[in-house]
Amino acid sequence: MRERKPATRPALCLAGLTVAAGLAAATPAAAETLESALARAYGGNPVLNAGRAGVRVRDEDVAQAQAGYRPTVSIDADIGVSRFEGQLGGGTIRQTTLPGGAGLTVNQTLFNGFQTDNRTRGAESRVFQERETLRFTELSTLFNAAQAYMNVLSDTASLELRRNNVEVLEEQLRQTRDRFNVGEVTRTDVAQAEARLAGARSDVSAAEAQLRASIGIYRQVIGVEPRQLAPGRPLDRFVPASLNTAIDIGLKEHPQILSAMHAVDFAEAQVKVAEGILYPQVALQGAVNQRYDQQLAGSNGVTAAIVGRVSIPIFQGGAEYSAIRQAKETVGQARIQVEQVRDQIRSAIVSAWGQLEAAKARVIASQAQVQANEVALNGVREEARVGQRTTLDVLNAQQELLNARVNLILAQRDRVIFSYGVVQAVGRLTARFISLPVSAYSAKTHFDQVKDLWYGVGTPDGR
């Protein structure tokens, strides 16, 4: 009996596979590459876009903090009705007036214990922290996209192998029945072939379900249905040369560490803000008012004043001192969290490096296993033809070869995914660093557009 060969060699099962949501062949089109799929995820992933919106939200904190440097201006107006009746010089006076007026008031803070300076510095630290959070979201999104891409490829290759296995077992069962009819084998051999075929068909159904699940995740992360996927290649050119180098890079560049450090800066600024309450507060107020009918009908006048005001806090119940102590404890907590994050990143890098090294070894071992099982299966079949092997021996050899091929596919998949995992773990899996064919999003652009705006309710993009 000859086995129908798979469409591709086992070592290349992840290449050039056509997949579709309904497990049907896709129409001819340019193949999607792993890089183009990552570019799609970079531009359209909702989690990543929500993170960008979050950075734009934080940008406005700086504009709000800087408002403390600027004057506040208000216009007020009033009008009313006043009725007077009384005696004056022996005569009776009855008078109705419409007292009213309008005024302009300008308030300018001159000194508030550097609270505005420190609020602005704290707001900028929050912006930088949010940018690092966005960069971490980008790392996660691109890694998830690479994983989804490779899962679809590997699941499709596994499904094709299992379908091929069903065809092989169907032929095996047909030949076993023919041999049973002429008395060469027993009913037990037929039952063994039937059982193995039934199991293979069940495996096909499970593989189809797994592929559909992977396609769903692909659609969720990348934003489109997978159609024709080109081979995925490891990201070895961006993997550091050694584990120690990877750890050094990660501890310096990983966005979660930098985010935690910016959180320390923000907490320190909040200490300064709280201390600023104890300083004298100096403000200047200018006002101009036009008044009508204040005492007599038809009277009017203009008043103008400039008033400087100094407020020196003495004691306000002690709450401000507690707030300062609380802010200092928050700084201590934030510094401890930096060390905690460093330990987490170090652990993640070591784990990712070990997974990549293991995947490389598994690819080599799986290739050797496939080759050995191919030789073993051919030998068992030849021995079965001369009566030295049973049908069960042939079925077992076929199953071992199938398992070896599936394991090779999974090892190849992991080889690619874990190379991306190492680059992610050190904090470099960004569109800019790995040179994705996209226009990189610049968080600074929106920051520069809004930080010095004095007025206006429209966003820079026109909303």
Image (cartoon, rainbow, N blue to C red):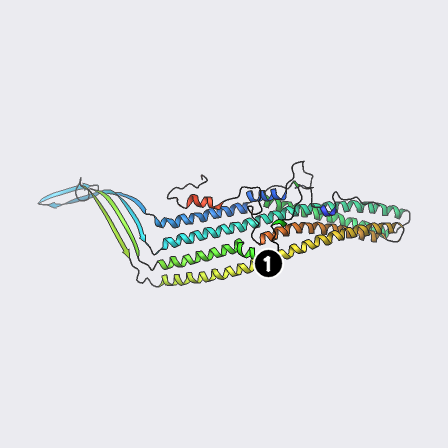
Residue sitting farthest toward the left: 90
Left or right of 329? Residue 12 is: right
Residue 195 in view in this figure:
no
For the residue pair 437 and 393, the one nearer the viewer reads as: 437
On the image, numbered disc 1 is attached to which residue? 244
Locate the N terminus and report the quarter of the image it occupies.
top right
- Residue drawn at 69 percent across, 50 percent down: 412
Instruction: Name the residue at the top extreme.
Output: 28
**Identity of the residue drawn at 42% across and 58% down:** 268
Crowding at dot 1, Cα within 10 Å, few <14 / some 14-19 / many 20+, comes out as few
Residue 233 position, x and y percent, is 65, 46
Residue 222 picture location, percent across and down? 59, 44
Task: Give whichever of 358, 236 is nearer the camera.
Answer: 236
Q: With respect to residue 282, does 53 lie above or below?
A: above
Report the number of numbered marks.
Answer: 1
Whether residue 94 is visible to the viewer of this picture, yes or no, is: yes
Say which amino acid is labelled 1: Asn
- Residue 79 in percent (x, y) is at 25, 42
For the residue labelled by badge 1, is the local secondary structure a helix, a strand or a loop? Answer: helix
Image quadrant holding the C terminus, namely top left
